Amino acid sequence: MGPNYRGAADQWAGFASAMVARWTAHASTIASHLDTGEYSVGCAVRDLSQTAALAADSSLALANETFECLAALSGRLNAPVTAESEPFHVPVAFAGAQQPIPLSLQGPLCNAAGTDALPVHAVTIEPAPVPVGQTQFAIHVDAQGHEAGTYFGVVIVGPPAAGEHVAVWVVVP
C-alpha cells in the first residue's frame, strides 16, 4: 500500500478543527470570567494553569498527529507487525523420540511489564509437532496492535496433560 495523501490531509484537517474548538472554548471561558468584573488573582492562576495544561496536551497531540500522518504517508500505518524468536530446544528426554513431538502453548505470551499479552491465536509454534530427528522449534507472533517489548510464556512439550514445560520468549519490535 502506497502513501495515503488524502487520508493524511483529512487527518490533519480533523486535528486542526479539534484544536481550534478546544482553544476557542478555553478562550471563551476566560473571556466570560473577565466579563464578570470580578476577575481576581485566583482566577488568573486557575486560567493560567488550565492554559498551560491545554498547551502541554496540544503539544503532545501535535507530536502524535505528526507521527500518525508520517505513518500514513509511508504506507505503513497498518503494516503487519510480526516477530520470530530464537530457536528453543525440546527437553533432553524427548531428543531420541521415535515419533513427532507435540507442542502446545500453555496460554498467552505476556510482556515483562505485565501491561500486554499476545493471545494464543496470535502465536504459532514452528514446527509443531517437532519432526522425528529434530529438537528445535521457534515462536512466531502476529503482534499488530500490541506493545513493543519482550513477551514470555510456556510451551508444553509432549502431551498437554503430562508434557514438560519450556520457557519461551519473543521480542516484538
Image (spheres, grey):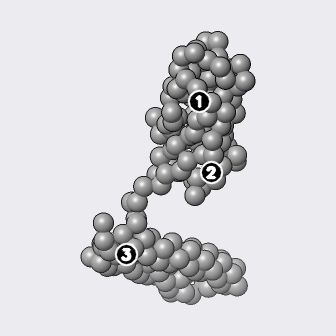
Whole-percent x, y for residue 88 in the image: 65, 37
Tally of numbered tags: 3
Q: Which of label 2 and label 1 is nearer to you?
A: 1
Residue picked out by circle 2 = 171
Residue picked out by circle 1 = 134
User: Left or right: where does residue 132 sit relative to residue 25?
Assistant: right
Helix, strand or loop under label 2: strand
Whole-percent x, y for residue 110 in the image: 63, 40
- Residue at x-position 51% and y-position 44%: 141
State yes or no: discs 2 and 1 in contact (Cβ < 8 Å): no
State yes or no: discs 1 and 3 in contact (Cβ < 8 Å): no
Ranked by sequence position, the earlier of labels 1 and 3 is 3
Give amino acid for label 2: Val
Whole-percent x, y for residue 83 in the image: 53, 50
Residue picked out by circle 3 = 73
- Looking at the rendered image, the quarter that the N terminus falls into is bottom left
- Residue at x-position 58% and y-position 35%: 137
Point out the residue furthest to the left here.
6
